[in-house]
């Protein structure tokens, strides 16, 4: 059996799989996000470790005892700054933090080859601009920083005592030469750092250490190997068998991502497309990233006094797609692809006396779909052909939303059994590859298909005018 741990934004999730790939058990422990100032988003790194222990101990003891290896996945880009004692010097700055916009411009000025080296435009969400912000605004903290780790890698340090990371997660720091799959000395120097501040680099299925004796004893398992793992999106892709060139997935979690595997490095920084390493050697991937997806459902349900997401989806379905003029721009935390705009914020537009909660719910689902359509257009502009996407994440539970997304994106959506398990499943699969020596093709197979949604041309035609208004609304909203 194999344990996958996903250090997410809203929770830490633990999943145990059998050698057959079957999910045997899963457990989770909640996390909270702190927003002390406008544009800020932070978490206490110690909370990740505590939640990891809670999630793992939430699994049946008999199943825990049979675990042969551990794989880590996690939220990307988070800056965890450690001092000489390997303790955090400040709260971690998260992926959806937008404070370092000015530092992005400064970073690209300091290293004019930034986009060439990394394949990506400098964005506030990436790790390097966060360190530039700390350097400018918290000089004492920056001076005391001896190591910078990503969230899952801080958990790795607590579990194994090792400072290591994988290629897919590290590609999101803006310190990696993504084509060469190695740290870039020039990018590190642009933020006043060097290789001594960085963890060792590994490919996803490589072993990085073993569980510390006290951790293994607490969890009721042996001192099993812990593999490098992957960033959450790459791990989620492995969980649904997205390995080959052109295969893709749509992730509808807190954020929304369209992920496409590539046999070669294919950057498109001009339209804020992310081009990163995949979790397997010799494979890369592209992503369009939207900072708010299922989080819009949670926010709007709470704002509209709806009990929860299931009831919110039901309200939207009862209203029907394009039921009225209401528009929702889903930019609760700014936006990445294609706008790279940390300052834009969400808005309802076109409300009238006749607007109902059901119509607002319908507008939210449509707005997230329209944002993803902007993203898939950017991917296609990079030469990527996308005809089919596997769907994962909490948003995969709504078939009605799937019909809207499929029609707006113009792609077939494939829903898989276990698709809602998410990145932790990919972590477990990487652990299985390391322990057994099996190939990715044998381990990272696509789960059985649960449902398929084809684009509906009639629905696409109905929604097309609303999408045109949506795009105009972004331009107008960004101006103010």
Image (tube, rainbow, N blue to C red):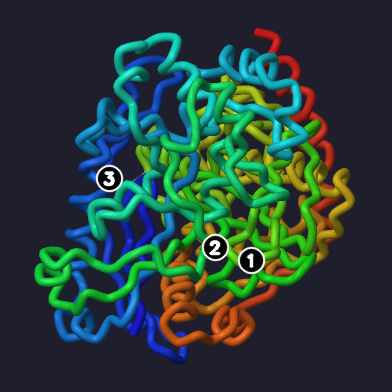
Q: Position of residue 138 (x, y in %)?
A: 35, 12
Rate crowding at label 2 as few (under 14), some (14 to 19) or many (20 or more) other CA atoms within 10 Å: many
Q: Which residue: 53% across, 24% down? A: 129
The quarter holding residue 370 reads top right
Q: Which residue: 52% across, 79% down? A: 417
Q: Position of residue 291 (x, y in %)?
A: 55, 37
Residue named by callout 2: 203
The answer to whether 388 appears left or right of 195 in the picture is right
Q: Mark 3 or 2, which is nearer the eye?
A: 2
Q: Which residue: 46% across, 24% down? A: 131
Dot 1 falls on a residue whose secondary structure is loop
Rate crowding at label 1 as few (under 14), some (14 to 19) or many (20 or more) other CA atoms within 10 Å: some
Residue named by callout 3: 31
Inspect this view and state whether residue 435 appears.
yes
The CA distance from mark 3 to mark 2 is 28 Å
Q: How many marks?
A: 3
Q: Which residue: 30% across, 13% down? A: 140
> Is 41 above or below relative to 216?
above
Going from N to C along the chain, the mark reached first, 3 or 2, is: 3
Residue named by callout 1: 281
The quarter holding residue 189 reads top right
Inspect this view and state whether residue 446 appears.
no
The answer to whether 478 appears left or right of 87 in the picture is right
The C terminus appears in which quarter of the rendering? Answer: top right
Q: Are marks 1 and 2 in contact (CB under 8 Å)?
A: yes
The CA distance from mark 3 to mark 1 is 32 Å
Going from N to C along the chain, the mark reached first, 3 or 1, is: 3
Going from N to C along the chain, the mark reached first, 1 or 2, is: 2
């Amino acid at each position: 059996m194999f344990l996958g741990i996903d250090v997410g934004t809203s929770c830490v999730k633990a999943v145990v799989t059998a050698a057959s790939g079957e999910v045997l058990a899963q457990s989770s422990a909640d996390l909270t996000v702190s927003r002390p100032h406008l544009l800020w988003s932070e978490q206490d790194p110690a909370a990740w470790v505590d939640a990891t222990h809670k999630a793992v101990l939430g699994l049946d003891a008999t199943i825990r005892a049979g675990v042969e290896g551990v794989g880590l996945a996690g939220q990307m880009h988070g800056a965890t700054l450690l001092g000489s004692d390997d303790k955090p010097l400040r709260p971690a700055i998260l992926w959806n933090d937008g404070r370092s916009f000015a530092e992005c411009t400064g970073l690209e000025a300091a290293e004019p080859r930034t986009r060439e080296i990394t394949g990506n435009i400098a964005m506030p969400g990436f790790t390097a601009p966060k360190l530039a912000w700390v350097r400018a605004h918290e000089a004492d903290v920056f001076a005391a920083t001896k190591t910078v780790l990503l969230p899952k890698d801080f958990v790795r340090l607590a579990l194994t005592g090792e400072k290591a990371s994988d290629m897919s997660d590290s590609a999101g720091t803006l310190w990696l030469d993504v084509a060469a799959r190695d740290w870039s000395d020039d990018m590190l120097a642009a933020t006043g750092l060097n290789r001594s501040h960085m963890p060792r680099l590994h490919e996803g299925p490589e072993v990085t250490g073993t569980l510390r004796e006290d951790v293994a004893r607490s969890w009721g398992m042996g001192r099993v190997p812990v593999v490098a793992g992957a960033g959450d999106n790459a791990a989620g892709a492995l969980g649904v068998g997205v390995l080959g060139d052109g295969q893709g997935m749509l992730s509808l979690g807190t954020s929304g991502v369209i992920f496409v595997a590539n046999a070669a490095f294919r950057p498109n920084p001009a339209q804020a497309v992310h081009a990163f390493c995949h979790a397997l050697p010799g494979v890369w991937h592209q992503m369009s990233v939207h900072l708010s997806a299922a989080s819009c459902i949670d926010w709007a349900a709470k704002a509209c006094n709806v009990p929860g997401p299931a009831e919110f989806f039901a309200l939207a379905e009862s209203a029907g797609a394009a039921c009225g003029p209401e528009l929702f721009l889903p930019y609760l935390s700014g936006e990445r692809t294609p706008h790279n705009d940390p300052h834009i914020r969400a808005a309802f537009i076109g409300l009238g006396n006749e607007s109902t909660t059901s119509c607002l719910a319908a507008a939210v689902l449509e707005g997230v779909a329209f944002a993803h359509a902007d993203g898939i257009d950017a991917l296609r502009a990079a030469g990527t052909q996308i005809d089919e996407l596997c769907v994962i994440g909490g948003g995969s539970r709504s078939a009605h939303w799937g019909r809207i997304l499929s029609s707006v994106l113009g792609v077939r959506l494939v829903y898989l059994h276990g698709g809602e398990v998410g990145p932790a499943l990919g972590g477990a699969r990487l652990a299985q590859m390391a322990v057994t020596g099996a190939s990715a093709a044998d381990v990272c197979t696509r789960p059985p298909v649960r449902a398929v949604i084809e684009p509906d041309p009639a629905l696409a035609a109905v929604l097309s005018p609303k999408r045109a208004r949506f795009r105009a609304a972004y331009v107008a909203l960004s101006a103010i």
